[in-house]
Image (cartoon, rainbow, N blue to C red):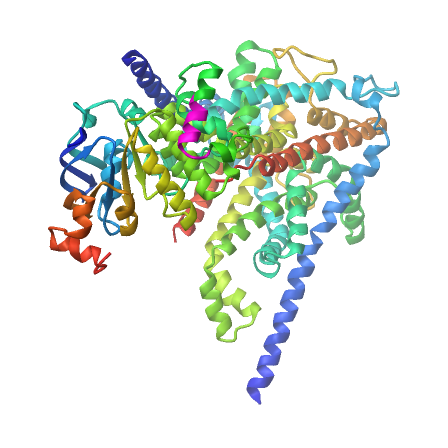
Amino acid sequence: MNEYISSKKRERIDKIFKFSIYIITFTILIPLFLIFGFIITNGIKNISIEFLIKNPVPVGETGGGILNALIGTFILIILSSVLAIPFGITAGIYLSENSNKKYAQYISTFVDVFQGIPSIVLGIIAYVWIVLPVKKFSALSGAVALSIMMLPTIIKATEETLKMIPYSLKEAAYSLGVPYHRTILKVILPAAFSGILSGTLVSIGRISGETAPLLFTAFGSNLLEWNIFKPMNSLPLLIFNYAKSPYPEWHELAWSASLVLITIVFLFNLLASIGEKKWKIKF
Amino acid sequence: MSNTYLKERRSESVFKALLLLSSFIIIILLFSITLTLIIESYPSIKHNGLSLLTGDIWDPVSEKYSILPFIVGTFLTSILALIISTPFSLAASLYLGEYAEGKRSSRLIKAVLDLLAGIPSIIYGFWGLMVLVPVVRKFEELIGIPPLGIGIFTASLILSIMIIPYTTSIAREVIKLVPQDIKEAAYSLGATRFEVIRDIIIPYAKSGIFAGILLSFGRAFGETMAVTMVIGNANYIPKSIFAPANTMASVIANEFAEATSDLYISTLISLGLVLLIMSLIVNSIGRFVIMKLYVK
Amino acid sequence: MEDQILTIRNLNAYFGDFHAVKNVNMTVYKNTITAIMGPSGCGKTTLIRCINRLHELTEGAYTTGEIYLKNNNILSMNPIIIRRQIGMVFQKPNPFPTMSIYDNVIAGYKINGIKMDKTEMDTIVENALKKAALWDEVKDKLKQKGAFLSGGQQQRLCIARAIAMKPEIILLDEPTSALDPKSTLKIEELLEELKKDITILIVTHNIAQAARISDYTAFMYLGELIEYDKSDKMFTNPSNPKTNEYLKGCFG
């Protein structure tokens, strides 16, 4: 009898626990809806072709867009990709190819730890390394900071993807008398393409929303700038500058710019997952 | 013919050397980042000495630099954020790893977490400033304290939303590592799911969950933009969790570009050095614990 | 007597401390099929992986002794050269997943950066596929990925890839163990045809297969070459009692 009651009680506790887990978990939906709700409803109002193809205008004038920030963001993305992707991939190849060596395992852990360095610290670094010597803010210095941020993600993506590729593929190439470098470049890397691509896109998505490392490197600008040795605007910088301004019109623009930025970031993430599925190689 | 082979052999060695070299990059980077910060913050450390840590005044105009207010601000915000977010992260990881494992509803929660993780920090900050600050202000009015809206509490709220996806993903991985047969053994003895979680899963996964929380702490104290926009930027030691303050990251973000004197910049860089060292320690411990768990 | 093409002298192969192939001596004759059989773990796969120098790629693995291809000692040559002269087909079909059927066949040239014109490539591909008895099945879909083929077709594609390099010898490491009986038969017939041009060394744990297709058979046990003889003799009247036991199914 006693046992019967206690098992009933246990079942009740089990149910209550399950119920609370569900409730607490689904509470996480609330901030998501609130954030997206506000950005979409406030942001959509000012979105137009004009908004995308015009440069900002001074306070008081109406209209104005985010063209310079959009272009700046893309220039920064391209620049940091050019800097980070080659090293990221080669380092990733080394780590997966030598995964049984102690040295490579240490480096692999290093890369994980590296990933945790706050982005603002990398901003300082790019400032000291590049802005300080030439005494000028520049898009290039911002890209250096961003590329250091990208590096660990690309290395990890390359390493993980290459580790999944069966050894038999390499053997097939070796048995045809293909030397090591050609085996890696012509057989292994193409087979890992989807994974590396998706890792790279994820890292691009991440840096395209970064602000902190750009505050005192790319710095921002009200002009449309193509020269990478000059200060350049980016979407996150523009949002930051508009957000802390006292003008409601600029807040409106910041909402719209946020909508554009979030769309870009999620497009990269979406591309990453589509790319990973679409070009996935079956072995 | 043999010439071609010789060339192949040379390219092979060059290629291998290149790979090895690029693996150095990360060490060289880490080393030179640390060195740069040490060198650049040295003037400030030399000039200010221990008063960097003992004083409580940050006044660049009179060249009084104590970073203590920011250290306090950083720890308060991050730890408060962990306290707020951990119940949600744990619930979500149990939900994903246990209750809804493989079910369709888990996809929804996973997508939600992915979306939250993808929102840029600046947008969290802007949203916090425009939406959360007024709400917090109302709340402060209600409980009868100065209704500022901005401050540590607001920053922690934003941070907690930002780190939930991160803690959850690590905790979920760790929960998945719990061997199925141990769980089944417990079920076969008549344990309820709650008891399996309490007596099997949590004890097995607790070091990993701890590591996840630690890594999220690392995330939280390094977070800059979202915090900068809502914390109130007050350069003194906060008296309560509703007070405006500054974190190390936020003070760098706010003042770096406007810092005029070399000493001022050097002191801000020393904050960067503290951030770097903290992040290296926290991440090393976190990664180490997780690695141990995988080996087990 | 046939011409000798491959002579193995005092070959020893190791994985670190593990002695996998123990002092093997044997001679392989041109245009024959030589089967190497034995229970799993007997060193037969290691033996043939020494011949194209794949063995040494394993961490801690090394070899001693000599293997002569005609008059050149394989073990002191550039492995890249050797591997282009000795083809290999593996247990599990391993076509290059990113390449089309056509590119898979020509892969040995293309990846190695050997330049040639389109017609030359076309001829090589067509001949190799014909020899691999795959041409009729794939000639209309040469641009498709090799991964869409059936297991047996994939294995024949791998054979085509190996023979496209015009090797003197091909090594086959249990090439039919992952295939159904019908595909197995097809490959066995194909090997009979191929030996007119190429010398074939096949590792198998299938006694019946060795008996069906080989001219010579080697029996290995615990790393040692127990017996090596003409297949007719080996399967009717083995001279070593261990071979007899194995053939009767007493172990392995």
Q: Please state if C134 lies on the left or on the right of C248 as rendered.
A: right
For the N terminus of chain B, the quadrant is top left
> Residue C123 sits in which quadrant?
top left
Which secondary structure type mostly characterizes the magenta part of the structure? helix
Q: Please state if A49 lies on the left or on the right of C120 as rendered.
A: right
How many marks do you count on the picture?
A: 0
Front one among B57 and A208: A208
The residue drawn where x is 81% and y is 33% is: A43
Position in image of residue A197 (x %, y %) = 56, 30
Give above or below for B290 relative to B199. Answer: above
Front one among A232 and B269: A232
Front one among C198 and C54: C198
Q: Which residues are magenta?
A: C124-134
Position in image of residue A211 (x %, y %) = 65, 28
For the C terminus of chain B, the quadrant is bottom left
Q: Is residue A238 visible?
A: yes
